Amino acid sequence: MSNVVPSVAVPSRTEAVLDALKHAILTGRLLPGQALVENDLAAQLGVSKTPVREALKTLAGAGLVTMSPYRGATVRTVDDTLVHSVYDIRLLLEPEAVRRAVALNAVPAGTPVTASGHWQAAAESLEHADHCTDRADRSMANRDFHRALYVGCGNELMVGILDGLRDQTALVSTVVWDRTPSWEQEAAEHRAILDAVLAGAAERAAVLLREHIAAFVDRNFGSARTGR
């Protein structure tokens, strides 16, 4: 197994290992289906097995790693079942969450984007994604963009459910971009969504977001199951 990252001194070894492994998975250095052997990872990262074991448990909870009593830990494989499960929930919840967030956080026409912290964060994430050269960084910037749009929806449970899908969505994106780079098209769709958000057009923002999510699934995995 090739090196994941060099060992670094940080306050929390488990957190450092978690970040290193997540980045390696989201850049494809650790491939879907690849075995994650605690001894090997600990040696590469210069830590004991304990933080590696804890990080793998956290990654399993986030949906990036699969744990089996027979095979041990492996990188989650992206298949149609995973994609449709994740994106069905996003299609059901995320457009409505964004519609509510826009309705609750609308700013008067002509007001600078900085008037809303959420919208400013969305704009900054979109700008950051445009300049990323690393697939993992770009994917997480995209996830930050989406979260900035829905986090102000006023429903903590809805936000929590969508937050729980962030890592799996990032994994799907990086796998897709590896075979069909499409982030420029998706970035253009993001800009149109943000324009609707800044205009206070809650219904239009929700429709554009729904079309954006469904189109990604349709292009890469077949028609989205949830009705549009």
Image (cartoon, rainbow, N blue to C red):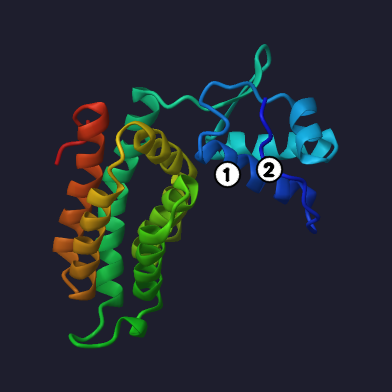
Q: Nearer the viewer, residue 52 or 149?
A: 52
90 over 106 or under it: above or below: above
Residue 16, image x, y percentages: 72, 50
In screen coordinates, is 120 left or right of 62?
Answer: left
Foreground tag (1 vs 2): 2
Q: Quadrant of residue 48?
A: top right
Q: Are marks 1 and 2 in contact (CB under 8 Å)?
A: yes
Asked whether residue 154 is in view, the answer is no
Count residues near mark 2 (Cα–Cα under 10 Å), then give few for <14, some for 14-19, many for 20+: some
- Look at the image and tell me in which quarter the C terminus lies: top left
Task: Give the residue displayed 45% in from the left and 38% down from the top.
Answer: 171
In the image, which disc is placed on residue 23? 1
91 over 37 or under it: above or below: below
Residue 196, image x, y percentages: 18, 68
Helix, strand or loop status at disc 2: loop
- Look at the image and tell me in which quarter the N terminus lies: top right
State the separation of the CA atoms marked 1 and 2.
9 Å
Q: Nearer the viewer, residue 111 or 151?
A: 111
Task: Give the residue displayed 35% in from the left and 63% down from the top.
Answer: 126
In screen coordinates, is 120 left or right of 4?
Answer: left
Residue closest to the far top: 70
- Circle 2 residue: 5
In the image, which disc is placed on residue 48? none
45 over 134 or under it: above or below: above
Residue 17, image x, y percentages: 71, 44
Name the residue type under label 1. Answer: His
Count residues near mark 1 (Cα–Cα under 10 Å), then give few for <14, some for 14-19, many for 20+: many
